[in-house]
Amino acid sequence: MGVEARAFWLTGRGTGELRCEVLPDPGPDEVRVRTLVSALSRGTEALVARGAVPASERERMRAPFQVGDFPWPVKYGYLVVGVVEAGPDDLLGRRVFVLHPHQDVFVVPSAAVTPVPDGVPTRRAVLAGTVETAVTVLWDAAPMVGDRVTVVGGGWSGAPSSPCSAASPERT
């Protein structure tokens, strides 16, 4: 029998709800992760919550493991650090970063998790997704040494961080 999980679903403009689901047991190449910290992307997730994802961008803006479609209902998010509680021995008990929607426990392929180095605090590790955003911007814009660059936006790059804790007493 699987584990019960709670996930946050956006159900309308600025509204959402917790929905329960029973997870399957992890397969041979999968892990079950219990969330320690999940962070909100201030720019992207605000757009999703407002139902303002342009139709032309809906496929490109799909998050890994997203369920549902824009505008709603949709289970969205992509900044999670958790602990592997079932899976391969080399990952069991390890803190990992995962691009996954806001959910207290979930099952994903082992290849979808990145172990967090021991010296990195959980609340800092959850920001790893912002590095991916920065790299994507560099790939898309292809600036050269000496180019002037202006960063405009309300996302993590220019905003104070505000990760929200999941059901966990950890405060690192």
Image (cartoon, helix red, strand yellow):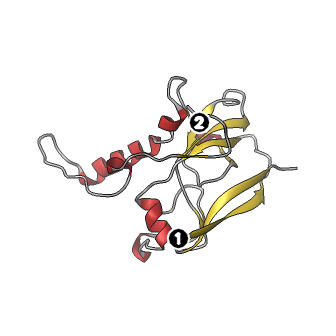
Q: CA distance from mark 2 to mark 1?
A: 30 Å
Three-letter amino acid code of the residue under disc 2: Val
Residue placed furthest toward the left: 146
For label 1, count other residues whose C-alpha is less than 10 Å away and answer few (under 14), some (14-19) or many (20+): few
Please give left or right for residue 94 compared with residue 53 in the image: right
Please give left or right for residue 136 compared with residue 76 in the image: left
Please give left or right for residue 36 compared with residue 54 in the image: right
Q: Give the labeled residue for mark 1.
A: 14
Question: Callout 1: helix, strand or loop?
Answer: loop
Question: Callout 2: helix, strand or loop?
Answer: strand
Circle 2 or circle 1, nearest the eye? 1
Residue placed furthest toward the right: 1
For label 2, count other residues whose C-alpha is less than 10 Å away and answer few (under 14), some (14-19) or many (20+): many
Vertical comparison of 22 with 56: above or below:
above
Mark 2 or 1 closer to N-term? Answer: 1
x, y (%) of residue 136? 35, 50
Residue occupying the point 43% across, 56% down: 42
Residue 34: numbered disc: none
Vertical comparison of 15 with 98: above or below:
below
Q: Give the labeled residue for mark 2.
A: 96
Question: Nearest the camera: 138 or 35?
Answer: 35
Can you see residue 114?
yes
Q: Quadrant of the C terminus?
A: top right
Residue occupying the point 64% across, 40% down: 110
Question: Nearest the camera: 108 or 149?
Answer: 149
Residue occupying the point 58% across, 34% down: 171
Residue placed furthest toward the top: 119
Question: Nearest the camera: 9 or 167?
Answer: 167
Vertical comparison of 129 with 102: above or below:
above
x, y (%) of residue 137? 31, 51
Three-letter amino acid code of the residue under disc 1: Gly
